[in-house]
């Protein structure tokens, strides 16, 4: 990089002026005009302030990219090879120690964190489950599903309605809701098997909305927009309420003072175990014939059929497994909230889950876990900026798509050691 | 059931709307032979291929594949419309319904016929080994519980599949590229990988759609050798579409020439070379004019 002689301040100034002008166009009408009844006030100060930030920022950036360091940095990012990487055979990750560390820290969290932090982490884990479920459908099988929230709703309402109508508790509904959601996945999957890409996205979007509208309008069964309460989990029949109509309560049995944090601790521990189980299953699935078939289907459906794979069953299995994970997440959501109503299952949720999968990296487990925590925990941390949450989302998306279009974590593929070939 | 002919095509007709792509195509492929389907551009070769491999549902005619000890009607497994007689015979009705719902070209492959594509269709984001493992989907242990628990039987099945993978990588000379992404390979390597992938499904007949397209002469030579290995060491029947006449004449036992959706000649390479109809179709020459292929 010896040809870099110095900083061309003229070029930087022009860059800064252009950026400032664009910022003026953009911010002028948005922040410069404040409605006041039928009148409006021009707020030049705010606009000037924002444009000045943009101009200075652009100038500094432009100068930086002309220095040796900046050139090296832009060179590095221009040449990023983002595709999947095949690991060498017998590759052992140096980060294996992190799994026991995360488990230990995760098990300590409920005993050291405050109740508020605990609820935020529970929400994060629920979205990890949702992200993992959608990752099977979108990331592995390549079927763009915009109605994933429908399965989430089926899980949540499954728990609430199962308790109300059949008296089934958390533990019996956990597997039943997963099966119900899988069944719903099959019902959705069967008619849409012939569709690809955009068409599939629209149909699944419709499915998600249908579920929400049914929940809203079938008031005699679902109690409509008023919602319905969901039961808490029990520990071998011990309830986490202050008082119990039948049976013992947790705090009475162990002679502890009542604390509403106990139920969150318990939900957290169960959820933590379920997330690890799902992570393990997912880890195995991608190495199994079914996981390979999903990815092959994503790459080329016609080639798949020419190799004897029944694309109908492969797609259905992806839909069903993804949906059942979504159903599990729904059960935890309902029991954690203690109450469900249809407004929790809007299209925005589907978009959020899809954002988790896209940001994390299609098909990457670790990436989805990180992205799920980022997208659910960050808004809680930045409570003061709550109004700008969606704006922040948008900016994050744009930045990610420019700098890391394939997601946070690069997808790796297992390498296989060479062996003697035998054919029977 | 005829053991001599692995594939019998009778009066195959394929119409796309008003366009008659194939008119009454009839030919037989002998078991254990290397046969070629040639013809000028637009003659309908790829249409025949797509009908044979179940990607198109033929408008009329019969395609019978006798492989794996049974005879399969390729048009039937793709799902036919209901006939009037089906409404009186529940068994026939359910058979047809089964094929209508779950039938498709994958059943053709399972019956023992596999194919490659003119424009390569590999799983580009997957490694070379994984491409070949996907092809063995029907031969490995697909039980979900066994896979998740990583049982002994599952590990054994996977190990056998990997051994087959490395055998076929050896045949197509791609052992060094085993752990690369399929999309990273060079064009010639991708062509060879696609043939290996087709062979991994354990077919009795493999259909190669222009396997030598875009290969240089030495690669074409290697390909010729490989096709001979398939025929001689694996008892696989090979049917290929090819424009490289040198290769076709060199390798084929039997040649079918198509033009305008009709078979204009069939026979051994020597007969075809001297057939005036073929020469005329290829070069547009007057019959009787002296042209050699």
Image (cartoon, rainbow, N blue to C red):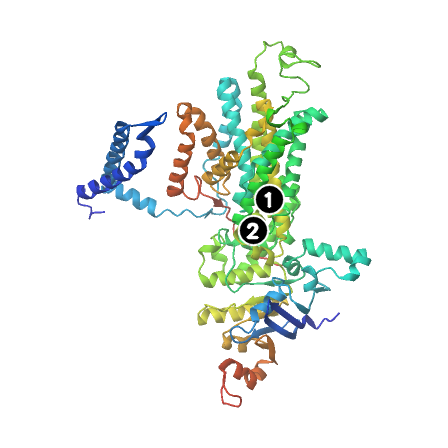
| Percent of width and height locating residue A390 | 43, 32
Question: Label 2: how many residues lie within 10 Å, few (<14), some (14-19) or many (20+)?
Answer: many
| Percent of width and height locating residue A72 | 28, 44
Q: CA distance from mark 1 to mark 2?
A: 10 Å
Query: Residue B192: which disc?
Result: none
Label 1 is found on which chain of the structure?
Answer: A
For residue B91, side relative to residue B107 (left or right): right
| Percent of width and height locating residue A293 | 58, 49
A248 vs A378: above or below? above
B261 vs A132: above or below? below
For residue A399, side relative to residue B121 (left or right): left
Quarter holding the C terminus of chain A is bottom right
Residue drawn at 29 percent across, 38 percent down: A25
**Is disc 1 in contact with disc 2, using a CB cutoff of under 8 Å?**
yes
- For the residue pair A181 and A273, the one nearer the viewer reads as A181
Residue B150 visible at all: no
Residue identifier under label 1: A318
Label 2 is found on which chain of the structure?
Answer: A
Residue identifier under label 2: A297
């Amino acid at each position: 990089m010896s040809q870099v002689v110095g900083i061309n301040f003229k070029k930087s100034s022009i860059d800064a002026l252009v950026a400032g002008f664009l910022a003026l166009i953009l911010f002028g009408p948005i922040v410069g005009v404040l409605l006041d009844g039928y009148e409006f006030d021009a707020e030049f100060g705010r606009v000037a302030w924002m444009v000045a930030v943009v101009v200075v920022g652009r100038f500094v950036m432009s100068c930086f990219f002309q220095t040796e360091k900046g050139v090296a940095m832009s060179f590095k990012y221009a040449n990023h090879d983002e595709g999947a990487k095949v690991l060498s055979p017998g590759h052992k990750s140096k980060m294996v120690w992190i799994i026991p560390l995360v488990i230990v820290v995760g098990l300590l969290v409920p005993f050291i964190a405050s109740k508020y932090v605990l609820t935020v982490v529970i929400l994060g884990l629920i979205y990890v489950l949702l992200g993992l479920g959608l990752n099977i459908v979108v990331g592995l099988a390549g079927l763009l599903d915009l109605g994933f929230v429908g399965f989430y709703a089926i899980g949540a309402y499954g728990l609430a309605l199962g308790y109300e109508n059949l008296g089934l508790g958390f533990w019996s509904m956990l597997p039943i809701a997963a099966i119900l959601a899988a069944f719903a996945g099959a019902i959705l999957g069967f008619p849409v098997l012939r569709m690809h890409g955009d068409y599939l996205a629209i149909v699944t979007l419709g499915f998600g909305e249908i579920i929400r509208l049914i929940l809203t309008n079938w008031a005699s069964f679902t109690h409509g927009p008023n919602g319905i309460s969901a039961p808490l989990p029990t520990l071998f029949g011990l309830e986490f309420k202050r008082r119990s109509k039948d049976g013992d309560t947790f705090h009475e049995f162990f002679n502890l003072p009542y604390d509403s944090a106990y139920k969150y601790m318990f939900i957290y521990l169960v959820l933590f175990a379920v997330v690890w189980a799902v992570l393990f299953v997912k880890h195995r699935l991608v190495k199994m014939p079914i996981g390979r078939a999903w990815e092959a289907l994503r790459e080329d459906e016609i080639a798949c059929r020419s190799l004897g794979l029944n694309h109908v069953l492969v797609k259905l299995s992806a839909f069903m497994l993804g949906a059942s994970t979504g159903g599990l997440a729904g059960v935890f959501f309902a029991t954690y909230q203690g109450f469900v109503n249809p407004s929790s299952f809007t299209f925005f949720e589907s978009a959020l889950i899809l954002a988790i999968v896209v940001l994390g990296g299609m098909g990457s487990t670790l990436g989805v876990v990180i992205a799920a925590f980022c997208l659910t925990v960050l808004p809680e941390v930045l409570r003061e900026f709550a109004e700008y949450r969606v704006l922040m989302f948008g900016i994050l998306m744009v930045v990610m798509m420019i700098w890391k279009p394939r997601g946070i974590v690069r997808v790796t593929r297992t390498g296989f050691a060479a062996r003697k070939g035998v054919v029977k | 059931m005829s053991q001599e002919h692995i594939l019998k095509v009778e009066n195959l007709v394929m119409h796309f709307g008003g366009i008659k792509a194939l008119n009454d195509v009839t030919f037989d492929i002998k078991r254990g032979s290397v046969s070629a389907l040639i013809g000028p551009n637009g003659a309908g070769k790829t249409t025949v291929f797509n009908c044979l491999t179940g990607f198109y549902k033929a408008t009329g005619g019969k395609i019978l594949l006798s492989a794996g000890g049974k005879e399969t009607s390729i048009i039937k497994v793709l799902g036919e419309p209901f006939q009037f007689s089906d409404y009186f015979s529940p068994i026939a009705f359910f058979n047809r319904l089964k094929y209508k719902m779950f039938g498709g070209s994958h059943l053709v492959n399972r019956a023992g016929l596999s194919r490659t594509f003119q424009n390569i269709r590999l799983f580009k984001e997957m490694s070379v080994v994984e491409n070949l493992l996907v092809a063995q989907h029907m031969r490995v242990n697909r039980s979900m519980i066994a896979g998740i628990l990583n049982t002994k039987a599952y590990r054994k099945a996977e190990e056998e599949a990997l051994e087959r993978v490395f055998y076929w990588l050896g045949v197509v000379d791609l052992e060094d590229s085993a752990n690369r992404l399929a999309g990273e390979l060079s064009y010639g390597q991708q062509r060879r990988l696609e043939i290996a992938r087709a062979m991994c499904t354990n077919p009795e007949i493999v259909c190669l759609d222009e396997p030598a397209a875009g290969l240089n002469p030495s690669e074409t030579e290697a390909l010729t050798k490989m096709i001979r290995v398939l025929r001689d060491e694996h008892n696989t029947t090979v049917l290929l579409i090819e424009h490289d006449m040198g290769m076709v004449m060199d390798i084929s036992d039997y040649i079918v020439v198509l033009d305008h959706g009709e078979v204009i000649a069939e026979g051994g390479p020597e007969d075809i070379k001297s057939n005036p109809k073929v020469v005329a179709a290829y070069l547009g020459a007057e019959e009787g004019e002296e042209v050699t292929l």
